[in-house]
Image: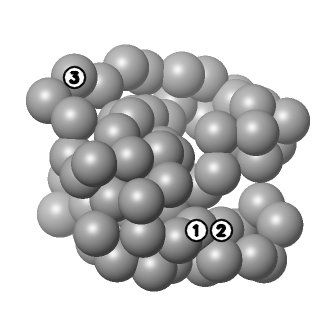
Amino acid sequence: MSTWKRTEVRRGRTYTVQPVSAASAQKEYVCPGCGLAVLPGVAHVVVWRADGVLGDEADLASRRHWHHHCWSIA
């Protein structure tokens, strides 16, 4: 994963968004935005709640890999 991340607020919730470069994308994931595969070698973002009530460990466990476009319109 990339070493930098940012915080974004969507619909009143705070999320941590961490970009993943194409070179670092090693596995296949399912994008929760469109339901299609985020393939190895495709740059994308990993997103997780930054303000969850169950704590940091639960927030990290629920992180998801999104296509850039899908996250931008979510």
The residue singled out by tag 2 in the image is 31
Tag 1 and tag 3, C-beta contact below 8 Å? no
Rounded to the nearest angstrom, the CA distance separating label 1 from label 3 is: 20 Å
Dot 1 or dot 2: first in sequence order is 2
Residue type highlighted by circle 1: Val
Residue type highlighted by circle 2: Cys
Which residue shows up at 61% across the image and 23% down it? 9
Which residue shows up at 78% across the image and 77% down it? 35
Tag 1 and tag 2, C-beta contact below 8 Å? yes
SS state under label 1 = strand
Rounded to the nearest angstrom, the CA distance separating label 1 from label 2 is: 6 Å
Residue 64 lies, with reference to residue 37, above or below; the image says: above
The residue singled out by tag 3 in the image is 4
Which residue shows up at 54% across the image and 22% down it? 8
Which residue shows up at 29% across the image and 25% down it? 5
SS state under label 3 = loop
The one nearer the camera, 34 or 41, is 41
- In the image, which disc is placed on residue 38? 1
The one nearer the camera, 64 or 68, is 68
Q: Nearer the viewer, mark 1 or mark 3?
A: 1
State whether residue 61 appears in this view. Answer: yes
State whether residue 48 appears in this view. Answer: no
Residue 13 lies, with reference to residue 41, above or below; the image says: above
Residue type highlighted by circle 3: Trp
